[in-house]
Amino acid sequence: MAKKPHRNGRGMFLGALLGAVVGALLGRLAGSALFGAILGAVIGSALLYRVNPGPWNRE
């Protein structure tokens, strides 16, 4: 049976939180912390939703 791609909701949530924090810090340097936080949350959640493998005990 083919392996399922590594995707999970916890990774998406964690990526949104981490991306928002990092984006706000970088956005503050660029002039708009709110825009940076929104953009960082979108990018971070998309990356960790796809990359984060989730639990080890999957079938």
Image (tube, grey):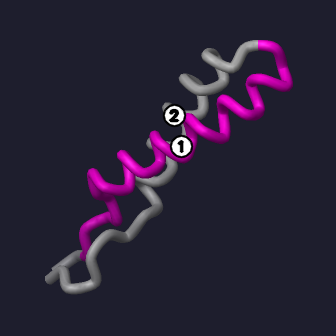
Label 1 sits on a secondary structure element that is helix
Q: Position of residue 19 (x, y in %)?
A: 57, 41
Using the image, tell me which numbered label, if any, was put on residue 44: 1
Q: Amino acid at mark 1?
A: Gly
Magenta segment: does it hold 16? yes
Residue depicted at x 36% and y 46%: 13
Residue density around tag 2, few if under 14, some if 14–19, many if 20 or more, within 10 Å:
many
Q: Relative to 8, is 13 above or below?
A: above
From the viewer's side, name the closer residue of 5 and 35: 35
* Quadrant housing the C terminus: bottom left
- The residue beneath circle 2 is 41
Give the answer, above or below, for where 55 lies relative to 31.
Answer: below
Query: Residue at left 27%, top 76%?
Result: 55
When asked about the image quadrant of residue 26, the answer is top right
> Which residue: 22% across, 76% down?
2
Main structural element of the magenta stretch: helix, strand or loop? helix
The residue depicted at 37 percent of the width and 47 percent of the height is 12
Q: In this orientation, which residue lies closer to the viewer: 15 or 25?
A: 25
Which element is circle 2 on?
helix
Give me the C-alpha separation between circle 2 and circle 1.
5 Å
- CA neighbours of label 1 inside 10 A, class few (<14), some (14 to 19), many (20+): many
